[in-house]
Amino acid sequence: MSTTLHLTLNEYQQMVACGAFDTIRRRVELIRGEIRQMNPAGPVHDDLIDYLNDWSVRSTDRSVIHIRGQTGMDVPHLDSRPEPDVFWVKAKRYLEGHPTAEDTLLAIEVADSSLEADRTAKAELYAEAGIQEYWVVDVQGECIIMMRQVGAGGHYGWLRTATVSETISPLAQPNAVLNIADLFGLSQLGG
């Protein structure tokens, strides 16, 4: 009888350090002890990430918030190293290790083919890790699903879907205003 191999975050880090993933041409992340392949990104996905990175850098004080993208976040107690598309962390150097959930102020996933997983499995992981704010950019729906207020059960207690007619701001930087129509390139098309 065979079983699935469950890895700890430490074992995964050792595999990365030994170059176990250097020759594969797939992006992977560790979620609850399982190595998961990430969906290949298309041009719209990549463009939205570029836009969000640029907006984030322009909208934050670098002495307080540092912007990272598609790099690891360590969640040791959940044997996970997710790689959010964009995330805001406390401003400091991370030479000794990846940012942790405690360092993370906002996590953003851009979801095209991964919408269901980002709305459920990733939301549950981020909430259980204690990340206070999580956004899912729904490419097909041209909206942003905002989640806040981690409750005792490890779920987000506040959920709202913001549409292209709105602007939104993260808790960590309320004066950082994201125009959703502009994000999706709709303001250039006249609506």
Image (cartoon, rainbow, N blue to C red):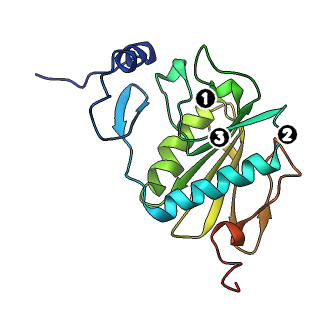
Q: Are marks 3 and 2 in contact (CB under 8 Å)?
A: no
Q: Secondary structure at mark 2?
A: loop
Q: Quadrant of the C terminus?
A: bottom right
Q: Secondary structure at mark 1?
A: helix
Residue 86 position, x and y percent, is 61, 45
Q: How far apart are the alpha carbons under marks 3 and 2?
A: 14 Å
The residue where tag 3 is placed is: 87
Tally the numbered discs: 3
| Furthest residue in direction right, as rendered | 175
Residue type at mark 1? Answer: Ala
Mark 3 nearby-residue class (10 Å; few <14, some 14–19, many ≥20): many
- Residue at x 58%, y 17% (from the top left corner): 97
Q: Which mark is residue 129?
A: 1
Left or right: 97 as drawn, with respect to 32? right
Task: Give the quadrant of residue 16.
Answer: top left
Q: Which mark is residue 61?
A: 2
Task: Give the quadrant of residue 66.
Answer: top right
- In this orientation, which residue lies closer to the viewer: 9 or 59? 59
Q: Is residue 164 visible?
A: yes
Residue type at mark 2? Answer: Asp
